[in-house]
């Protein structure tokens, strides 16, 4: 076995002697990528999953590239340019121009086939030569940057000099033309909707892309790796940096503008949607200014005021940053720091680096949302995809494609758009007016469904009969009375006209003007008084807007800044173009119109995941706990059109010795009462440390909990340890490690079944019952409820075992855990050691002996 581990270490470049389960993991992963399969990999935390993924996947990529180079070199060597095509052409018909006889047709067809094959071969050879030339140029460029430190500083000095010169020119221009520019500035020119004359529903051009962007570069074979959070991505990148591949791999990390923007003016907007829109607006301004300056060379005109552009959006600077990040592995924080130093945008530099990159790291949203994926320049065709921390993948896809809009947002969007059209009616063409009026009509009908009227404050419109209704998309459109409106055309109009962005700019400008002292109130401001008053009333209530006197309280409650209400409405309306069977609309009425809401609920996540698995060469779905696996197979993979023979499952045990874990199912308490913690029987308990309601208090509670445990171990006395009570599915139950003394015993009280009376869950169950067959006599709906419960259990009880030397006991307080269908859904490495105790005494004795043995072993060491 030691010899096999040594071979695995050398084959996979593992940095140290691998455990047998790590060797098995890497070998299975390699085979999945080589054979182009869909693999579900389960490897508990503490077993070196990340390093196994890195070494296994990058070893395959290294071998694949070497094999591809050898095949290309062989083809280039064997290729001999074809000669004498002219005499073949001459022989294709008689010299005297007569038509060939029937007996010659076969020979002629053979020649045509041979010619086509030879041409295809020549085209392939030309393509290989072109790719090889590009590869060599890229490697030479990166080698220069990697090895020539003086070149880096020279380029930096040149950039600094250029920036200083540009800044001086800009300042001088502003001094000379500021008064003239203000005089010539058009009336809110940037807020006017562009002329819209076409109902063509072809896909619009990507407004995010500049003509100069180098996105045509051939994409090399690469591995796309994604996980749920930026912290998990950063941890993975640090593992890559420490691995044997860290010096040579070309890695690029993708993230949102919110995480990667280095423009302070944009960053302070806080809301992701507002940051995105401001960034795109600045790009558009830059392209418009450049085009205007080019036109003015030929036809000089009076200079107008330049609109705000981003100084970090420079192609020369961004391409320099792109090369820098390809030379050395960097996480997002390191990339942002380098972007500030080079005065280049990290967000776009990372996108430019995708084609030559070998490993692309990104969050779930970037991968799983189709338009985001396309806008980022990600091409999955023939590539490898690794989805890590995938235990909640189905819920994540469902959440990304579900949209909620409140009555407050609907009323606010209607009021804003009404004020907008009143102000700019004379500036808008007929087609624009038509669509804006349609959208106003839709908004009014949506507010009406919630029991309210537009034009009135939604906070004062009370709902006398609350409740929840659930409709199919078609039924909802019919009930809302705009089923006669083509929602695909409305969606197309939103995208082409950039209505939400224009409306936000208009509202933002006039909200700001009210807050600034101004002695000369002009006519423009008076026209928007109704809008300002309405927004002010909304701000006096907790609708998501942040007012000065509420700012501190909102931060405590962690309420995000509400972006433009129309942006929220836009997402909901787009969702209504989904297939009728794949989604539902939930109408929630409560309290006031402002508190009521409409929500689009995605029922079939496979419809979006199918796009991913269809394109990729291979897909790896990995996690510490993937049980129950049937859920992934049935709802996500098989439903996406993946054939059963393409699926591969791998589950490994834990690296901890079997004696380091004691899972016990306790069926009865000290009094002999059977333990069954259902909703009706639950009791409240006085806590010691308690999970906080606000996420910003989590660190404080954990710190106090940890300090208490450390104090009790150093100074034995009245305090002998600490208890931390937490809700399953809460902030403490996932993503936080309670290793060593922080988590020696995990007690799971009851079974955390979801609320069976939830309309959304009932609809999901009904949908599965209609689309999937029964399993062992159970309906898919009932299995869904069981699976949701056990996924939450598995995540929670896995918090305590975090490395090979760790040990802990796991107590499951409920007799229902002994049921075979429930027990089978525990992770294999826990299930194999689980023992059921019918009474309290033996269970307590087993736990006491477990910890005494561990203390004896610790003292002996």
Image: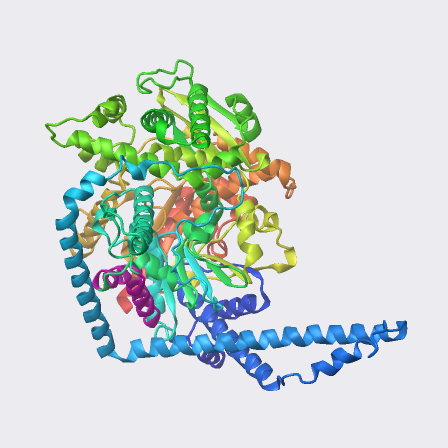
- Residue 528 lies, in percent from the top left, at 26, 25
Looking at the rendering, in which quadrant would you find the C terminus? Answer: bottom left
> Magenta span covers which residues?
315-341
Residue 16 to residue 186: above or below: below
Give the overall secondary structure of the magenta segment.
helix
Residue found 58% across the figure and 62% down from its top: 37
- Residue 789 lies, in percent from the top left, at 47, 41
* Residue 321 magenta-highlighted: yes
Residue found 29% across the figure and 60% down from its top: 314
Choose between 133 and 678: the one closer to the eye.
133
Q: In the image, 585: left or right of 589?
A: right
Q: Residue furthest front?
A: 299
Report whether residue 739 is seen.
Answer: no
Q: Residue furthest top?
A: 464
* Residue 131 magenta-highlighted: no
Residue found 25% across the figure and 23% down from its top: 527
Choose between 129 and 353: the one closer to the eye.
129
Residue found 82% across the figure and 79% down from its top: 95
Counting the numbered discs, the total is 0
Asked which quadrant contains residue 158, the reply is bottom left
Choose between 9 and 252: the one closer to the eye.
252
How is the model colour-coded? rainbow
Q: In the image, 436: left or right of 503?
A: right
Residue 587 to residue 713: above or below: above
- Residue 448 lies, in percent from the top left, at 44, 19
Asked which quadrant contains residue 423, the reply is top left
Choose between 288 and 834: the one closer to the eye.
288
Report whether residue 412 is seen.
Answer: yes
Asked which quadrant contains residue 249, the reply is bottom left
């Amino acid at each position: 076995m030691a010899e096999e581990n040594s071979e695995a270490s050398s084959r996979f470049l593992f940095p140290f002697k691998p455990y047998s389960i790590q060797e098995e993991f890497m070998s299975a992963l390699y085979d999945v990528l080589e054979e182009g399969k869909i693999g579900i990999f389960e490897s508990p935390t503490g077993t070196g999953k990340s390093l196994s993924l890195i070494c296994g996947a990058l070893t395959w990529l290294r071998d694949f590239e070497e094999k591809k180079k050898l095949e290309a070199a062989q083809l280039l060597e064997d290729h001999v340019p074809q000669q004498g095509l002219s005499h073949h052409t001459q022989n294709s018909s008689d010299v005297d121009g007569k038509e060939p006889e029937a007996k010659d047709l076969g020979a002629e067809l053979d020649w045509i086939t041979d010619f086509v094959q030879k041409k295809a071969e020549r085209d392939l050879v030309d393509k290989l030569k072109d790719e090889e030339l590009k590869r060599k140029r890229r490697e030479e460029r990166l080698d220069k940057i990697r090895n020539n430190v003086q070149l880096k500083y020279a380029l930096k000095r040149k950039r600094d000099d250029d920036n200083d010169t540009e800044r001086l020119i800009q300042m001088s221009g502003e001094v000379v033309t500021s008064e003239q520019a203000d005089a010539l500035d058009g009336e809110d020119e940037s807020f006017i909707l562009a002329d819209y004359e076409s109902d063509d529903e072809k896909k619009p051009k990507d407004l995010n892309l500049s003509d100069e962007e180098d996105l045509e570069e051939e994409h090399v074979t690469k591995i796309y790796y994604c996980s749920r959070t930026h912290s998990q991505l950063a941890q993975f990148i640090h593992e890559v940096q420490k691995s044997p591949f860290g010096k040579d791999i070309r890695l690029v990390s993708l993230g949102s503008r919110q995480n990667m923007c280095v423009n302070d003016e944009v960053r302070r907007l806080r809301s992701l949607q507002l940051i995105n829109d401001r960034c795109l607006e600045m790009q558009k301004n830059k392209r418009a200014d450049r085009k205007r300056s080019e036109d003015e060379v030929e036809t000089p005109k009076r200079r107008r005021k330049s609109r705000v552009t981003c100084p970090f959006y420079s192609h020369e600077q961004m391409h320099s940053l792109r090369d820098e990040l390809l030379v050395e592995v960097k996480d997002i924080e390191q990339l942002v720091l380098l972007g500030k130093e080079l005065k280049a945008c990290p967000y776009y530099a990372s996108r430019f680096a995708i084609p030559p990159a070998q490993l692309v790291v990104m969050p779930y949203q970037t991968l799983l949302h189709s338009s985001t994926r396309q806008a980022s320049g990600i091409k999955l065709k023939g590539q490898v995809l690794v989805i890590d921390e995938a235990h909640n993948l189905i819920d994540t896809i469902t959440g990304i494609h579900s949209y909620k809009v409140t009555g407050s947002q609907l009323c606010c969007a209607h009021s804003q758009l009404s004020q907008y059209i009143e102000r700019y009616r004379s500036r808008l063409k007929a087609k624009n007016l038509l669509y804006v009026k349609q959208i106003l009509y839709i908004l009014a009908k949506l507010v009406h469904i919630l029991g309210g009227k537009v034009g009135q404050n939604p906070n004062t419109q009370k709902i006398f009969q609350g409740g929840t209704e659930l409709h199919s998309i078609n039924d909802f459109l019919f009930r809302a009375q705009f089923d006669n409106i083509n929602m695909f055309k409305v969606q197309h109009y939103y995208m082409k006209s950039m209505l939400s962005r224009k409306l936000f700019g208009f509202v933002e400008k006039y909200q700001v003007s009210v807050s600034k002292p101004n002695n000369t109130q002009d006519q423009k401001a008076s026209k928007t008084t109704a809008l300002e008053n309405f927004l002010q009333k909304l701000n006096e209530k907790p609708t998501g807007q942040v007012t000065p006197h509420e700012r501190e309280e909102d931060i405590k409650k962690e309420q995000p800044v509400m972006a433009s209400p129309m942006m929220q409405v836009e997402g909901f309306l787009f969702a209504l173009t989904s297939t009728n069977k794949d989604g539902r609309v939930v109408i929630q009425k409560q309290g006031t119109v402002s508190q009521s809401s409409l929500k689009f609920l995605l029922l079939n996540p496979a419809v979006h995941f199918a796009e991913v698995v269809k394109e990729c060469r291979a897909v790896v779905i990995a996690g510490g706990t993937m049980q129950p696996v049937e859920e992934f197979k049935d709802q996500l993979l098989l439903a996406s059109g993946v054939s059963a023979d393409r699926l591969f499952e791998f589950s490994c045990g834990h690296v901890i010795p079997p004696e380091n874990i004691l899972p016990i199912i306790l069926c009865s308490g000290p009094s002999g009462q059977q333990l069954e913690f259902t909703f009706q029987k639950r009791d409240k308990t006085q806590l010691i440390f308690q999970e906080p309601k606000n996420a910003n208090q989590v660190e404080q509670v954990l710190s106090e909990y940890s300090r208490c445990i450390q104090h009790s171990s150093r100074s034995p006395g009245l305090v002998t340890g600490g208890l931390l009570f937490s809700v399953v599915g809460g902030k403490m139950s996932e993503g936080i490690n309670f290793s060593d003394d922080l988590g020696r015993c995990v007690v799971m009280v009851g079974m955390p079944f979801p609320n069976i009376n939830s309309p959304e869950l009932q609809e999901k169950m009904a949908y599965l019952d209609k689309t999937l067959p029964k399993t062992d006599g159970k309906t898919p709906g009932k299995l869904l409820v069981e699976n949701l419960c056990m996924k939450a259990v598995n995540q929670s009880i896995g918090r305590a075992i975090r490395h090979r030397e760790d040990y802990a006991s796991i107590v499951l307080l409920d007799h229902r855990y002994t049921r075979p269908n429930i027990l089978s859904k525990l992770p294999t490495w826990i299930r194999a050691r689980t023992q059921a105790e019918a009474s309290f005494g033996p269970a307590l004795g087993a736990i006491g002996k477990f910890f005494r043995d561990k203390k004896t072993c610790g003292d002996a060491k």
